């Protein structure tokens, strides 16, 4: 079942301008309890950069046809990579600025945001936040507008530009079927040999993360990435250095789509603004009609 | 009102040197368009995961919608505020809006990866009310329908009682005939319902276009990222509406050798500096409120583009149009003012959708491919051609031919000159 915490859209055929925005304020939406969402904790201190997660994800989803041995190649760390249509997840290597010989690898994939911008953007609901947390995609609905790609603050969704007739948006699915129907771990978590990836509910993972920070003084920075970023994400990260030296973007706690949704819902608030504008224009039309009806032709100089 | 001021079909040759060039461009664009639909986005565009939107969205859609604003601003002025003297420009503006939006949709289809699913937002099961794009899409769709309805009486006026299709199509004659007469009889009474609806719908989606990019706070340059962006989009659409109408009207009279509607257009031009001034003032106050002035001096592409947008597209035309001399002269109106404003608003849309957009992990700048440019140029050319064709066959433009004096008899012998004086 899909989570639909917001009011379902009340379609109005009219609306008023953004003058309504000021009064719109926050829609009266009760905050969602995100603590029970599934999540994964990525501990970059424990990660050994073996790329097994990339391999597992490839075999589970993208089936790019790359030979399994090709995932042993560590030279890929020399350049910067991003997830794309053929890889829902990739590892990148970064270094400790104070101690450049110390290197860390970090896995990136869709963060499965608590308040996903991609879902808010999607014109047809092809992207959907499920009740257990994963953000999933339904190609059948998608019209290929790529607004989700514009919206994602982590720049995750990739597109099959090379597919002329059936292009899809591609991103990590959180192995949705595996975890909800088959009650298995996500493929990447299951394969991880060093338990750098931990699967659980968001609350459990936050507890574990803070416990690890506290019980290993000096090893981690005191920051669980994803706890607050962009309103919180299902995937959480621990790192030994400030996250601004890593792959992940510096983000505030603001929910990314809150501004657009506030404006959007303000304009359509109970249909009132559009109807008011309609009525106002109708009045003007009526009032000016009388005045101008007869004399206009005479008074306007037509040469 | 004498007969000359009634809108009437303009009799002239369709093909001139200009229209032949446009036809070639439109044909090339059509080829590129078909190739895009078959070969896909990779083969025809420079779009990638970093830059999901290119000129088809920034120019064909966003700029196209803004420049079609003449339709609703003119309708509001003439039909809602009943400024009767502006009625001569209502029909050309309506036609522009109708064609403009039609081509916006055609342009959008080129950009959609799954264009065959374009009807999905109409299905209630797929309505997604949080999506700004959904609002824009639905409003544009309904407004386009309203525009076609508003246009129907013009078609009826011309063809009612004279539908006479040849060959096997003649069986349709009766059907079309009764459709036109029903439309003619009923629409007249309800047309104001549609006119007001058109204005409301326009306000909605013009402003929502300004909301679109606000979903990407970390990617849009602070010079353009403001929560009042929807208001700015609406105000600039209103401000560009009249200039676009003036621009087209003068262009049409030039091309059809009609007497330009200078008195009406000059007085219409009086509104423009006021509308632009309000837009500018709000834009500057907003910049101050957000403490965004320092971004102007950072010397980036964005800061330069912002200055060109404001200086060239707003300040310059305000100064020009405040002068009576400019407002009264055809060249003044045409180039110095309206063209500058039209380009200024186009630049604003391009800035918001392309220049202000910085991907988080850039792999290089985006520049449109040959195919993208061909499609865009082709669409604009085709729009002008269809406009010309319809104006030649429907009562859209009210205007007298520029009186041509009788030429000496020996000059009149050549056929092309004969045409000129007929
Ligand atoms: S990371 Fe991007 S794609 Fe994934 S849920 Fe968040 S907004 Fe959507
Ligand atoms: S590309 Fe598809 S999934 Fe993305 S916003 Fe558009 S319709 Fe939704
Ligand atoms: S959760 Fe599944 S889809 Fe996502 S990165 Fe891991 S294996 Fe790939």
Image (cartoon, rainbow, N blue to C red):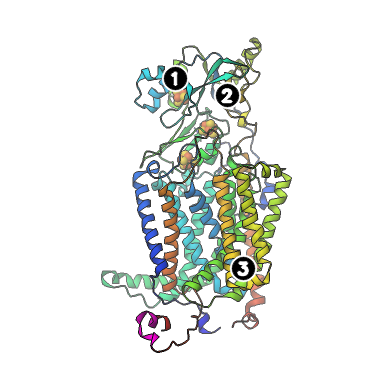
Q: State the image coordinates of residue B297 (x, y, percent, origin top left).
A: 68, 43
Give the side of residue A44 with respect to residue B282, left or right: left
Instruction: Identify the residue under disc 3.
Output: B77
Residue B413 part of the magenta-drawn span:
yes
Q: State the image coordinates of residue B379 (x, y, percent, origin top left).
A: 43, 57
Q: Quote the CA–CA distance across marks 2 and 1.
A: 19 Å
Instruction: Identify the residue under disc 2.
Output: A246
In the picture as drawn, the residue positioned furthest to the front comes out as B410
In the picture as drawn, the residue positioned furthest to the bottom comes out as B409
Is residue A31 visible to us here? yes
Rate crowding at label 2 as few (under 14), some (14 to 19) or many (20 or more) other CA atoms within 10 Å: some
Chain letter for mark 2, please. Answer: A
Indicate the secondary structure of the residue bearing disc 2. Answer: loop
Q: Quadrant of the C terminus of chain A?
A: bottom right
Chain letter for mark 3, please. Answer: B
Residues behind callouts 3 and 1 on a single chain: no
Q: Do tag 3 and tag 1 residues touch (Cβ < 8 Å)?
A: no
Q: Do tag 2 and tag 3 residues touch (Cβ < 8 Å)?
A: no
Q: State the image coordinates of residue B286 (x, y, percent, origin top left).
A: 70, 48
């Amino acid at each position: 079942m899909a989570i639909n915490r917001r009011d379902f859209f009340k379609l109005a055929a009219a609306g008023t301008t953004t003058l309504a925005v000021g009064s719109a304020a926050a829609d009266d939406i009760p905050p969602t309890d995100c603590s029970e969402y599934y999540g994964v904790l990525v501990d970059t201190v424990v990660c050994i950069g073996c790329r097994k997660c990339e391999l597992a994800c490839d075999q589970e989803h993208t089936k790019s046809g790359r030979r399994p041995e090709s995932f042993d190649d560590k030279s890929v760390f020399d350049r910067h990579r991003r997830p794309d249509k053929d890889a829902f997840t990739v590892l990148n290597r970064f270094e400790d600025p104070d101690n450049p010989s110390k290197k860390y690898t970090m896995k990136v994939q869709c963060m499965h945001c608590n308040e996903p911008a991609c879902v808010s953007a999607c014109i047809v609901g092809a992207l959907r936040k499920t009740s257990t947390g994963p953000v999933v995609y339904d190609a059948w609905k998608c019209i290929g507008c790529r607004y989700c790609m514009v919206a994602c603050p982590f720049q995750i969704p990739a597109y099959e530009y090379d597919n002329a007739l059936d292009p899809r948006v591609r991103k990590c699915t959180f192995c949705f079927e595996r975890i909800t129907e088959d009650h298995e771990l996500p493929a990447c978590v299951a394969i991880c040999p060093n338990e750098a990836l931990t699967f659980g509910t968001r609350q459990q993972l936050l507890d574990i993360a803070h416990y690890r920070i506290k019980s290993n003084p000096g090893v981690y920075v005191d920051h669980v990435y994803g706890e607050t970023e962009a309103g919180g994400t299902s995937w959480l990260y621990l790192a030994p250095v400030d996250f601004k030296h890593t792959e992940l973007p510096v983000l505030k706690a603001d929910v990314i789509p809150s501004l657009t949704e506030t404006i959007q819902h303000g304009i359509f608030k109970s249909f009132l603004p559009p109807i008011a504008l309609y009525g106002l224009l109708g009045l003007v039309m009526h009032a000016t009609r009388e005045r101008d009806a007869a004399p206009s032709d005479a008074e306007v100089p037509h040469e | 009102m004498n007969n000359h001021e009634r809108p009437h079909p303009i009799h002239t040759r369709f093909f001139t040197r200009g229209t032949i060039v446009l036809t070639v461009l439109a044909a090339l664009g059509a080829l590129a368009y078909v190739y895009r639909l078959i070969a896909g986005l990779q083969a025809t565009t420079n779009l990638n995961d970093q830059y999901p939107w290119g000129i088809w969205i920034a120019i064909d859609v966003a700029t196209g919608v803004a420049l079609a604003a003449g339709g609703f601003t003119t309708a509001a002025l003439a039909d809602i505020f009943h400024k009767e003297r502006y009625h001569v420009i209502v029909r050309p503006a309506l036609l522009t809006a109708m064609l403009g939006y039609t081509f916006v949709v055609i342009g959008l289809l080129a950009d959609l990866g799954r264009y065959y699913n374009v009807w999905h937002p109409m299905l209630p099961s797929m309505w997604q009310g949080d999506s700004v794009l959904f609002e824009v899409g639905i409003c544009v769709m309904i407004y386009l329908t309203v525009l076609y309805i508003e246009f129907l009486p013009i078609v009826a006026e011309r063809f009612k009682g004279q539908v006479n299709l040849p060959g096997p199509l003649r069986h349709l004659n009766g059907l079309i005939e009764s459709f036109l007469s029903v439309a003619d009889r009923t629409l007249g009474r309800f047309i104001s319902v549609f006119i007001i609806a058109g204005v409301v719908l326009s306000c909605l989606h013009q402003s929502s276009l300004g909301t679109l990019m606000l979903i990407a706070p970390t990617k849009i340059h602070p010079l353009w990222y403001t929560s009042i962006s929807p208001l700015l989009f609406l105000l600039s659409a209103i401000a560009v509406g009249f200039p676009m109408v003036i621009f087209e009207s003068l262009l049409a009279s030039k091309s059809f050798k009609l007497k330009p509607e200078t008195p009406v257009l000059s007085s219409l031009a009086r509104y423009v500096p006021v509308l632009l001034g309000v837009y500018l003032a709000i834009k500057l106050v907003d910049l101050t409120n957000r403490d965004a002035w320092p971004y102007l001096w950072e010397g980036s592409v964005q800061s330069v583009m912002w200055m060109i947008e404001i200086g060239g597209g707003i300040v310059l035309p305000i100064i020009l149009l405040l002068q009576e001399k400019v407002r009264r002269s055809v060249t003044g109106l045409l180039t110095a003012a309206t063209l500058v404003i039209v380009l200024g608003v186009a630049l604003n849309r391009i800035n918001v959708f392309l220049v202000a957009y910085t991907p988080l992990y850039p792999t290089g700048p985006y520049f449109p491919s040959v195919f993208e440019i061909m499609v865009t140029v082709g669409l604009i050319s085709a729009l002008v051609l269809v406009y010309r064709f319809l104006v030649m066959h429907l009562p859209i433009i009210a205007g007298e031919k520029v009186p041509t004096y009788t030429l000496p008899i020996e000059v009149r012998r050549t056929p092309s000159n004969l045409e000129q004086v007929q």
